[in-house]
Structure formats: C-alpha cells, structure tokens
Amino acid sequence: MLKDLIKKNRSYRRFHQDKTIDKETLIELIDLARLSPSARNAQPLKYYISNDDTTNDKIFHHLAWAGYLKDWNGPAKGEQPSAYIVLLNDTTISANYFCDDGIASQSILLGAVEKELGGCIIGSVNRLQLQRELGINDQYKIVHVIALGYPKEEIDLEEMKDNNHIYWRDVNDKHHVPKRSIDEIIID
C-alpha cells in the first residue's frame, strides 16, 4: 500500500555500510524518476551515481548531516551510505527545474523503500567543490544529493506537540520525527 511506503520513507542517516547496492539497482531507481512527471516535460534533471567506497568517501566529505542534531557530525565509518545519487540540473536544457527535483527524489526514495533501502535527501552540500572533485561538467549544477543504504536506525513518527517540529534522538539513538495532525493542516 502506498501509505505504508510513505510512512517507511524517512530521512535515514545511519546505514549498514557493508551492505552494498549494485549499479543496476541505482539505475532502476533513476528510471522511476525518469518516468515521473516533469514541469513542462522539459526533463532537465540528470543523475550521477556512486556505489564504490572511493567515490562515496569523496561525496560524503562534502555533505552536512542533520542540522538539528548539534552534537552529531554525521554517520560514523561503518554507518555511512553505501551509495549516492547526485541530482543535477542540465542548464543546456533549462535554467529552471521547477519542482522536478522533489518529484524525482520522492520517486527514487519510494522505490528505495520498496527494495528495503532507505535514503536521505541532503541539501546542505558544498556543491562547487563536490562538482570539481567528481569531474562533473559545468553545464550541470548540483541540485542535491540522495544518500542511500540499508537503514541501521529506527525512526518513530509521533504527534507534534506545542508546535515543536524539531526531530531528535533519544538515549537509545531512536530518531523521533514530530508530525502535525491532519486536522491542523487542512484549512476549512
């Protein structure tokens, strides 16, 4: 059921790094994005994939993780993603990708959950340095990075209290994500 996939589709930040994701699986996930709607049907997004330790390490060092967790600098060795998909805007097609990045990313992540994978869309990226280090042509601009792997953490959705939207971890490292109630978000 789609709702179950959506509920399982969390921002996972710790993974079983030793469990690899093959290139074919990454291509299957990108194919879901390719088949998804695109504003004006321009389809300006392109994708750079990585599933090897050397390239993954290059990407990892250009990302910032979980801004609300002030005492955590991201996943430790052994808990880092085993693959990445870097979303790129091909500026020779369009300077504006409108909402395509969100549509494509959701399609990729729902496909990942269906395969028992988890991921995290990372917008805090040192884009120019990462682009140079990966040797990506200047016609492409990094939009964001999707980290992927087999989740190593438990995430609990809970009712938001007192308008506090900050996610947090408890003493057992369980990740808690407050969500507004359906009554709060529908305006009559």
Image (tube, grey):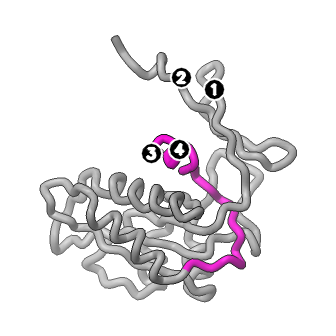
Q: Residues within 10 Å of mark 1 (few under 14, many from 20)?
A: some
Q: Secondary structure at mark 3?
A: helix
Name the kind of residue labelled 2 in the image.
Ser
Is the Cβ of the residue at disc 2 closer than 8 Å to that at disc 1?
A: yes
In front: mark 2 or mark 4?
4
Name the kind of residue labelled 4 in the image.
Asp
Q: CA distance from mark 2 to mark 4?
A: 17 Å
Pointer 1 residue = 159
The residues colored magenta run: 1-21
Q: Earlier in the sequence, mark 2 or mark 4?
A: 4
Is the Cβ of the residue at disc 1 closer than 8 Å to that at disc 3?
A: no
> Any mark on residue 2, and which?
3
Q: Secondary structure at mark 4?
A: helix
In the rendered image, residue 20, in percent from the top left (x then y), is placed at 62, 79
Q: CA distance from mark 4 to mark 1?
A: 17 Å
In front: mark 4 or mark 1?
4
> Any mark on residue 4, and which?
4
Q: Residues within 10 Å of mark 4 (few under 14, many from 20)?
A: few
Q: Earlier in the sequence, mark 3 or mark 2?
A: 3
Is the Cβ of the residue at disc 3 closer than 8 Å to that at disc 4?
A: yes
Q: Quadrant of the C terminus?
A: top left
